[in-house]
Amino acid sequence: MPELPEVEVLVRHLAPLLHDRTIRAVLVRRAKVLAPTSARSFAQVLRGARFGSLARRGKYLVFELRKSGRREPLPLVGHLGMTGRMYLLPARTPLPTHTAVVLHLGCENFVFEDTRYFGRLTLDTSALDRLGPEPLGERFTMARFSRALGRSRQAIKVKLLDQSLLAGVGNIYASETLYRARIAPTLPALKLTTPQAKRLWHAVRAVLREAIACGSTVPLYYAGRGLRDGLFYFGRAPGAPDFYAERLRVYDRAGRPCRQCGTLIRRRVQAARSTFYCPRCQRG
Ligand SMILES: [Zn+2]
């Protein structure tokens, strides 16, 4: 499931490809992903609009469009959900089965494909209002982070997934961050000592930065259906080397030795999600 680094890499990939392109026509195959925008107003508003900047906010893609006769830029908000993919496809290529939305750009189509339809592509921006600071941004200060942790009895792993605390960290990077900071995932947030909170603040930034750098240089997600077809792709393509999994220290490594101490990595369920940790390195 894509988190902040994957979305950041996708945004950097798509931004220059979409810039200045005009939406000639709109095809909605799954109106669910537009909610609460209706298919009719979605098509009406976007037809004739031109792509401007593209930015990331948490796990959201924020497309800014321009339309003649409109002074204000038009925001379009995307979220990949569990299985969403967004990419450009030559106009003559048949659309994939799980295509949710197509924006026709002339000789190419911008395709939003989602096998489970948990993703979003909508004109509604309210989800962005609920997001906390960007972990790599200036507003995410150590003082603010420590204060927020001090007010929560939730296990620190669960708290890290709270998008109002910091935006963009999901299940994978929460486990990776706690391992790096050597903190037990079950420790209540308010029990963290000041040195632990500091380590965690540094760790989350380092883990995300590394993942972005890695995603920008490793072509793994640009492979689809077993081929390097140039499409941004989540999930491992059959036969593709799994650089991504090799890079993770604890996530999905239950029963395998910790790279630091050799103890077997454990998995436990917290708030219905898997947590991976080293019981020896993460005793604090
Ligand atoms: Zn260990």
Image (cartoon, rainbow, N blue to C red):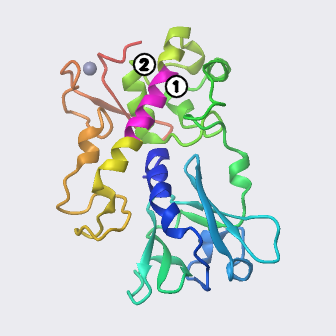
On the rendered structure, is 17 left or right of 211? right
Instruction: For mark 1, give the secondary structure.
Output: helix
On the rendered structure, is 244 left or right of 139? left
Residue 205 is a magenta residue: yes
The structure residue drawn at horizontal position 58% and vertical position 26%, both measured from the top left corner, is 154
Dots 1, 2 in contact, CB < 8 A:
yes
Question: Residue 141: which quarter of the image?
Answer: top right
Q: Which residue is labeled 2 in the image?
A: 183
Residue 241 is a magenta residue: no
Measured as percent of width and height from the top left, residue 202 is found at: 48, 22
Rounded to the nearest whole Å, what is the CA distance between mark 1 and mark 2? 9 Å
Instruction: For mark 2, give the secondary structure.
Output: loop
Q: Which residues are magenta?
A: 200-211
Residue 156: mark in rendering: 1
Q: Give the amino acid at mark 2.
A: Ile
Q: Give the amino acid at mark 1.
A: Ile
